Image (cartoon, grey):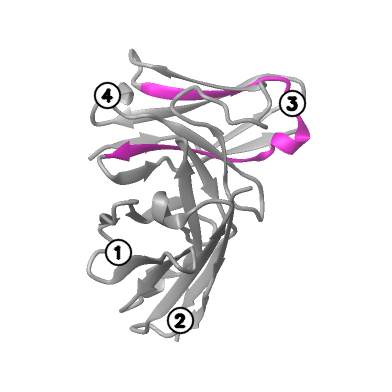
Amino acid sequence: EVQLVATGGGLIQPGGSLSLSCAASGFTVSNNYMSWVRQAPGKGLEWVSTIYSVGDTFYADSAKGRFTVSRDNSKNTLYLHMNSLRGEDTALYFCATRISMITFWGQGTLVTVSS
Amino acid sequence: NFLLTQPHSVSESPGKTVTFSCTRTGGSIASNYVQWYQQRPGSFPTTVIYEDDQRPSGVPDRFSGSIDSSSNSASLTISGLRTEDEADYYCQSYDTSNWVFGGGTKLTVL
């Protein structure tokens, strides 16, 4: 069974940094297409970043230059390193994977950027 | 770049059929596959339709998807509505490697 568990969220001041983790089970992170999607309070879904199995990475304009997606194959875990955080980055961050063209989601981790 | 536009909300009675639209502005709806996600209150999204009209195992056949090139839109239809279908529904497609989401439609079953 595919499972994704995102952790690492919390309250952070504007300009700060935070790293999110997404522990995967039931499949191999390094062999699959993995993404981060966020949802601001009361708002819709917004794509943040994707890493392909070959290692290519892609970012939404809002994340470029500030966020970095990576993975640790030994831990079967996906990461999102976030710098220069802004109030508009406040959201529930979900990780997702695509297996046989079906997207599987995990529960999110809440990031709140506020002074 | 393109946009996906969804109606903000839809209401329907139990047992009825409802259809959600997802209209693409910029390019053809047939250019990239469309997915539909269901997000119940307080939960994470789940896939109910992928690749325009495919249903993952475990999703009831009351859910169906289609695309219409004449209106440049995708549709999600739910028949035999149940109260547990009450949720937000999002369409999503790809713009090269980027994901594009519609704004979501809130379904109320009353």
**Amino acid type, mark 2:** Ser
Which chain hosts label 3? B
Q: Position of residue A5 (x, y in %)?
A: 58, 63
Residue drawn at point x = 54 percent, y = 57 percent: A42
The vertical placement of B89 against A18, above or below, is above
Residue drawn at point x = 73 percent, y = 20 percent: B80
Labels 3 and 1 in the same subunit: no
What secondary structure is marked by label 3? Answer: loop
**Amino acid type, mark 1:** Ala
Q: CA distance from mark 3 to mark 4?
A: 33 Å
Residue holding disc 1: A63
Q: Quadrant of residue A49?
A: bottom left
Q: Position of residue A93 (x, y in %)?
A: 49, 63
Q: Residues within 10 Å of mark 3 (few under 14, many from 20)?
A: some
Q: CA distance from mark 2 to mark 4?
A: 41 Å
What secondary structure is marked by label 2? Answer: loop
The mark closer to the camera, 3 or 1, is 1
Q: Which mark is residue B13?
A: 3
Q: Relative to A13, is B31 on the left or the right? A: left
Q: Quadrant of the C terminus of chain B?
A: top right
Q: Which residues are magenta?
A: B73-95
Q: In the displayed orientation, state which residue is furthest to the top.
A: B70
Labels 3 and 4 in the same subunit: yes
Residue holding disc 4: B28
Q: CA distance from mark 3 to mark 1?
A: 41 Å
Which tag, 3 or 4, sits closer to the chain's start?
3
